[in-house]
């Protein structure tokens, strides 16, 4: 039987360490012989990367909350159809830097009703869900300091205030509590190696792969 691919999503606020830890996880899984596709949202396919430019650029108030969510879901649908589902069908592992929980967190913090997000999700992805979602959690101020230290130009979401980012964090944690089988919260304020070890341990237990610690 061919190895079956798994879909892992990494979530968390700016500077939580998502990109850093995805690199480590990809290397660990590749070391076990898996083919690993690393992708991101919004984006991850040609069409979705075009939509990403519309979402990330411009002023904070460029889109109202519903328009923004429709753009996010148009991008998500294209990403799934063109990138994620074909890779999983080939038996590859897919790691996405952000996915639907970021919609709940960011568009939810922006004022969109979470029930509306569920409805859009039902249209765009049916019952498809990640096999595992790692939520990298850390205090907003720590993430902001990390992101600032590494900073390129900021985007529409980073430009919002601390209150917005506190709401984002709270929605991520509420999602993890509501869906404990899919989600795992990782303490991302720890040092890089400790976070990587926590992720490896979680992936090993949840998905049944023996990753080196
Ligand atoms: N555990 C850690 N301890 C200290 N610094 C870290 C840790 N993890 C990441 N960093 C540093 O913090 C910065 C942000 O990390 P990274 O780019 O991986 O975060 P991110 O979650 O992908 O951010 P963004 O949402 O902005 O893409 C980088 O300079 C990275 O080296
Ligand atoms: Mg990143």
Image (tube, rainbow, N blue to C red):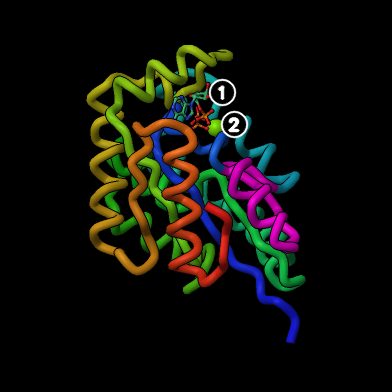
Rendered view: 89 above or below 121: below
Relative to the observer, which residue lies in front, 118 or 186? Answer: 186
- Of all residues, the one furthest to the bottom in this rendering is 1
Q: Position of residue 75 (x, y in %)?
A: 60, 48
Question: Which residue is the site of mark 2?
Answer: 54
Does the residue at mark 1 contact the one at mark 2 (Cβ under 8 Å)? yes
Q: Residue at (30%, 56%) from the top-left corner?
A: 176
Q: Position of residue 90 (x, y in %)?
A: 76, 71
Rendered view: 44 above or below 126: above
Q: Which mark is residue 119?
A: none
Relative to the observer, which residue lies in front, 91 or 162? Answer: 91
User: What is the number of callouts on the image?
Assistant: 2
Q: Residue at (64%, 52%) from the top-left corner?
A: 28
Rendered view: 15 above or below 188: above
**Secondary element at tag 2:** helix
Is the residue indicated by label 2 positioned so its CB lies within 8 Å of ligand 1? no
Q: Position of residue 166 (x, y in %)?
A: 24, 31
Q: Residue at (65%, 57%) from the top-left corner?
A: 29
* Crowd class of label 1 (few under 14; some 14 to 19; many from 20; radius 10 Å): few
Is residue 111 toward the left or the right of residue 32 in the image?
A: left
Start and end of the magenta stretch? 22-44
The answer to whether residue 200 is magenta is no
Question: Which residue is the site of mark 1?
Answer: 57
Looking at the rendering, in which quadrant would you find the N terminus? Answer: bottom right
Residue 156 makes an appearance in the image = yes
**Secondary element at tag 1:** loop
Distance from disc 1 to disc 2, alpha carbons, whole Å, reads: 6 Å
Q: Quadrant of residue 119?
A: bottom left
* Crowd class of label 2 (few under 14; some 14 to 19; many from 20; radius 10 Å): some
């Amino acid at each position: 039987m061919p190895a079956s691919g798994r879909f892992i999503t990494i979530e968390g606020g700016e500077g939580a360490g998502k990109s850093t830890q995805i690199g480590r996880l990809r290397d660990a899984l590749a070391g076990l012989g898996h083919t690993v596709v690393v992708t991101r949202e919004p984006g991850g396919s040609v069409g979705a990367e075009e939509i990403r430019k519309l979402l990330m650029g411009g002023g904070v108030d460029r889109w109202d909350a519903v328009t923004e969510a429709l753009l996010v879901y148009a991008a998500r649908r294209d990403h799934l159809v063109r990138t994620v589902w074909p890779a999983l069908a080939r038996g590859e592992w897919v790691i996405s830097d952000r996915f639907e929980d970021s919609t709940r967190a960011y568009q939810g913090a922006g004022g969109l009703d979470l029930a509306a997000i569920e409805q859009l999700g039902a249209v765009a992805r049916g019952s498809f869900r990640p096999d595992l979602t790692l939520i990298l959690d850390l205090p907003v101020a720590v993430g902001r300091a990390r992101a600032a230290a590494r900073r390129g130009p900021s985007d529409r979401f980073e430009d919002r205030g601390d209150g917005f980012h506190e709401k984002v964090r709270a929605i991520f944690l509420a999602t993890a509590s509501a869906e404990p089988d899919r989600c795992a919260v990782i303490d991302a304020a720890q040092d890089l190696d400790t976070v990587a070890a926590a992720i490896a341990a979680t992936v090993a237990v949840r998905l049944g792969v023996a990753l080196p610690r």
